[in-house]
Amino acid sequence: MTRARQNANISPAVGRNMIINGAMNVAQRSASVTGIGATTGYFTCDRWRLACGNTAGRLTASQTADGPNGISANCLKLDCTTADTSIAASELLIIQHLLEGQNVQRIGKGVAGAKQITVSFYAKANAAFTFVCQLADIDNGRNISKLFNVTTDWVRQELTFPADVDDGSSPFDDNNATSLELNIWLHAGATYTGGTLATSWANAVNNQYAAGIDSFYSSTDNNFFLTGVQMEVGPVATDFEQEEISVTENKCFRYFQKFDSVGANYQRYGVGFNYSTTGHSNPIKLLTPMRAIPAVGTTGTAANYAINHNADSITACNSVPSLAATADNPKHNIGIVCTVSSGLDAGDIGMLVSNNNVSSFLSFDAEL
């Protein structure tokens, strides 16, 4: 056992893992989504994006209670539901984790004194496969990739990437935009596999990203499981950092928050005021400060929302709640507006609620 691992076991450094929700414990959007493959997006486990492009392959993504004992009860599971064995050049499927520049400054990338990065994770599949783990420097157009093998058993992958000193001119930007991507390539065409894998830091060339990988979409028998993802500074993969669920949730809330009625009767979203006989404005209190002013997500059906006013009168909305022209304070509150056909008293208080017991929600998305 190395001294670094001994020290980590004795007194683990809190916060050494730069990955958020690596244990796949938080899934605000959904526990399972089918038919994925046509578009890129966040579907199930928070902070984990699926990049999909130009393939007929389709999959179901789910948060599944099948994690390795002692690491996490949960994992991200991908299940191939439509195969694609005729792989066009531009096809791709990637599990992605995007990191803000201000959260990766400890790496010191691109300048003298830059540090090594070790990525570790637990993975398994229905059969033996070879896939690629890639680090992509978005600020400076540089990348590095490593092949890894999976079997039908949970195996911890430990991949150490060398420091990228470069010419001293390519540090990560110190801001709230994407600086570093952790990419796990599961399927790709010749555009991304036609060259020689970039196993050392290099200026990005598409065909060097994922050379040598197998295809997740080769059969509808295929599945892939991932959990216990950790990225840390240094040459040693220390034990997976266990984190209280409340800490993980608050980290996730910086990027996405969902207020879901789940069929509740008149779910209360927030108290605001009626600025006219048809208009209502509501400052929604956020759970935590968000990365940026978020986009508002709804069911898309105005009648699923209503204004409670005038001593418990319920008037259905005729426009879905949307972001106000000027957000009140994106660090704490988001102003949203909606309208009804008539009946509000201008200047009075009103409460935005779900209409009757319909399953409506409000979400706030500030993802990278």
Image (tube, helix red, strand yellow):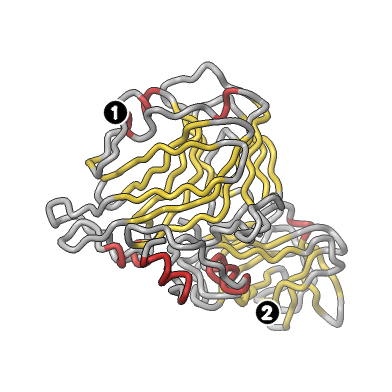
**Disc 2 target residue:** 273
Looking at the image, residue 190 sits to the left or right of residue 75; the answer is left
Dot 1 amino acid type: Thr
Dot 2 amino acid type: Phe
Looking at the image, residue 257 sits to the left or right of residue 53; the answer is right
From the viewer's side, name the closer residue of 78 and 124. Answer: 124
Compared to 79, does 194 lie above or below? above
**Disc 1 target residue:** 196
From the viewer's side, name the closer residue of 275 and 14. Answer: 14
Residue shown at 52%/76% (left/top)? 328
Q: Earlier in the sequence, mark 2 or mark 1?
A: 1
Q: Quadrant of residue 85?
A: top right
Q: Quadrant of residue 284?
A: bottom right
Q: 10 Å neighbourhood of mark 2: few (<14), some, or many (≥20)?
A: many
Residue 356 location in percent, x, y? 87, 64
Residue shown at 68%/79% (left/top)? 273
Q: Residue furthest top?
A: 86
